[in-house]
Image (tube, rainbow, N blue to C red):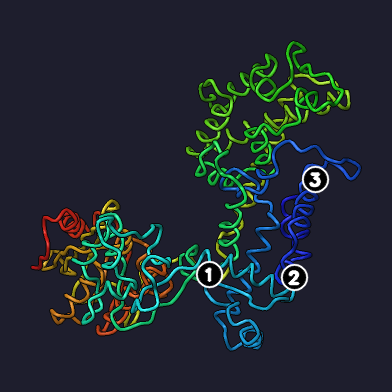
């Protein structure tokens, strides 16, 4: 609840200021400090005791943090959004006024020449600088893009071979294209660049017609600016992720578990040693007896409290006798804790997971009641409390299951889509066409293959395969679809049903919203589909496209270069 209040209530109250002005760093740090204190406070009279570094609170939840907004980074992200809006909507009055007064403010390299700019313009300047870090060029004609100075090849730094003299190095990307066809000059690129760079360049798609270069937001798949992605990129510059020990994929799965939110906070505090146990409080100078209140024989710290205490061990043994046995105890406590969660979650044994967290929660509640309220306890009381909380978690999960994940009136994405023609019976077509792509991440080489099948007997009646270069595995799938459609059009086929094992392909073709790196390939596919009288596409299993899969693999390995039958 506190996370919701901080991110969606407290910070939202001054979002407008963050969106318009660059807030000084001292004020941002002060706000961060107040929000951190609010998080650790237990009541209104308490000042709170910070148990971990504030950077861990600002760390994204998928990396083991809590995702509390870092004000300085959030301020820059909102200003970058403002600059994006002004730059790509030049018809706005604000854009025209700012461009007239500060000509370079909204450029790719923002600059203010006025000696005394306003506070608002200085904020836009900072937002423009933040925005420029996430802009990339989509190569059309290549005349506007510098080979070395601009970012145009995803996730790689473009460098020439050391043996290429400076005077022989081209300046613009247009110099790397064949002027008559507009495709990449294969021999020139392999001559100028190292193999790793040349392979990535050759894997970039090329438009079918002449198109000017344009910029896009490289941190979002469709190229549109998102404050969320901008904030993630900016916060990574202020917070080190090297301190994260648990795998980020584990945290992403953990936050999605169907358990009580307070149990997730308990696990987060356990794994980050953020519990105010007696030994931690004593180290902070708080006068408290650090002896464990259960066994009275050792200091109270997280590992002892939840696992090594003899009293706690008997509780776990009682729990193991009534549910699935706990995983074997490794040396590290964090490994023991995460292995239990992973084991139960992977097998979807939610009842055992509820009992495990219910026991941890009951131990902690009883510890607090005994230490601060002098409550009398017994092992059976703790077991009953753990059972009560596990039942409560199960009921909460049942209520969540009753609520549909998809809003009323909507349905999940179907596996069969009509791309052209009427929504008739699936098999009422001249030919079935299965297609598949194979991609090598190391050298960006790919193979594309397609097979024409008889709709009645499913017998292969034709097809083809060819070698190509692709930027991703999905790109190779789309190229296979494109080559197969062109082959079908040459064969005079007018009604076609496409079969693919990739669910992303029907979505991308149907709605034409996709990865910015594939927009021209998808548009060409849609143009070819328009030449058929009817065209359907269906998601099928890998075994249903076995012939195309084998041919694509052979093409990727250069066993087949260009083959049709």
- Residue 341, quarter of the rendered image: top right
* Residue that sits furthest to the top in the current view: 297
Q: Which mark is residue 37?
A: 3
Q: Element under label 2?
A: helix
Residue situated in front as seen by the camera: 485 or 469? 469
- Judge from the rendering whether residue 557 lies leftward or rightward of residue 123; answer left or right: left
What's the CA distance linking mark 1 and mark 3?
Answer: 43 Å
Relative image position of residue 522 (x, y in whole percent): 34, 74
Residue 425 in sight from this viewpoint: no
Residue situated in front as seen by the camera: 98 or 553? 98
Rendered residue at 19%/54% (across/down): 553
Q: Element under label 1?
A: loop
Relative image position of residue 143 (x, y in whole percent): 36, 79
What's the CA distance linking mark 2 and mark 3?
Answer: 23 Å
Nearer to us of marks 2 and 1 is 2
Residue at mark 1: 410
Rendered residue at 62%/24% (across/down): 319
Q: Element under label 3?
A: helix
Rendered residue at 17%/62% (across/down): 467
- Residue 449, quarter of the rendered image: bottom left
- Judge from the rendering whether residue 156 lies leftward or rightward of residue 239; answer left or right: left
Q: How many marks?
A: 3
Relative image position of residue 108 (x, y in whole percent): 52, 73
Q: Is residue 275 above or below residue 556?
A: above
N-terminal-most mark, 1 or 3: 3
Residue situated in front as seen by the camera: 455 or 78? 78
- Residue 379, quarter of the rendered image: top right
N-terminal-most mark, 2 or 1: 2
Residue at mark 2: 16
């Amino acid at each position: 609840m506190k996370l919701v209040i901080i991110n969606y209530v407290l910070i939202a109250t001054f979002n407008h200021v963050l969106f318009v002005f660059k807030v000084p760093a001292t004020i941002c740090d002060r706000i961060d400090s107040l929000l951190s204190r609010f998080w650790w406070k237990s009541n209104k009279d308490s000042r709170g005791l910070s148990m971990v570094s504030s950077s861990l609170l600002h760390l994204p939840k998928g990396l083991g943090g809590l995702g509390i907004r870092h004000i300085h980074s959030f301020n820059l992200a909102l200003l970058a959004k403002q600059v994006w809006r002004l730059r790509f909507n030049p018809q706005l009055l604000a854009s025209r006024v700012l461009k007239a007064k500060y000509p370079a403010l909204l450029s790719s390299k923002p600059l203010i020449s006025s000696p005394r700019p306003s506070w608002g313009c200085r904020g836009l300047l900072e937002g423009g600088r933040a925005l420029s870090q996430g802009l990339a060029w989509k190569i059309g004609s290549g005349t506007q893009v510098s080979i070395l100075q601009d970012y145009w090849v995803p996730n790689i730094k473009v460098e020439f071979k050391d043996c290429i003299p400076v005077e022989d190095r081209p300046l613009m990307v247009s110099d790397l294209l064949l002027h008559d066809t507009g495709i990449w000059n294969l021999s020139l690129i392999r001559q100028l660049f190292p193999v790793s760079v040349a392979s990535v360049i050759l894997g970039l798609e090329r438009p079918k017609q002449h198109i000017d270069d344009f910029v896009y937001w490289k941190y979002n798949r469709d190229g549109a600016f998102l404050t969320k992605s901008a904030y993630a990129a900016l916060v990574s510059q202020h917070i080190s992720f090297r301190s994260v020990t648990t795998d980020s994929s584990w945290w992403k799965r953990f936050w999605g578990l169907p358990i009580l939110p307070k149990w997730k906070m308990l696990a987060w505090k356990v794994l980050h040693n953020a519990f105010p146990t007696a030994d931690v409080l004593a180290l902070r100078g708080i006068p408290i007896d650090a002896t464990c209140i259960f066994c009275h024989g050792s200091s109270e710290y997280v590992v002892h409290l939840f696992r090594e205490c003899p009293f706690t061990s008997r509780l776990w043994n009682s729990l193991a006798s009534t549910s699935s046995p706990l995983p074997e105890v490794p040396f590290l406590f964090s490994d023991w804790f995460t292995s239990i969660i992973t084991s139960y979650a992977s097998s979807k044994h939610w009842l055992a997971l509820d009992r495990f967290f219910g026991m941890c929660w009951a131990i902690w509640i009883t510890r607090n009641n005994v230490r601060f309220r002098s409550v009398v306890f017994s092992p059976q009381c703790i077991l009953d409390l753990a059972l009560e909380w596990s039942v409560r978690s199960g009921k909460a999960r049942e209520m969540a299951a009753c609520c549909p994940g998809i809003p009323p009136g909507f349905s999940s994405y179907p596996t069969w889509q009509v791309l052209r023609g009427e929504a008739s019976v699936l098999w009422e077509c001249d030919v079935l066409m299965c297609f598949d792509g194979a991609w090598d991440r190391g050298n960006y080489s790919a193979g594309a293959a397609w097979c024409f099948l008889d709709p009645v007997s499913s017998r292969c009646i034709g097809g083809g395969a060819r070698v190509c270069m692709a930027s991703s595995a999905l790109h190779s799938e789309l190229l296979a679809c494109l080559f197969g459609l062109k082959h079908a059009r040459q064969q005079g086929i007018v009604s076609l049903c496409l079969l693919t094992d990739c669910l992303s392909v029907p979505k991308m073709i149907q709605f034409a919203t996709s990865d910015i790196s594939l927009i021209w390939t998808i548009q060409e596919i849609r143009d070819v589909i328009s030449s058929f009288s009817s065209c359907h596409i269906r998601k099928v299993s890998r075994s249903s496209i076995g012939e195309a899969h084998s041919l694509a693999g052979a093409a990727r390995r250069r066993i087949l270069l260009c083959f049709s039958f």
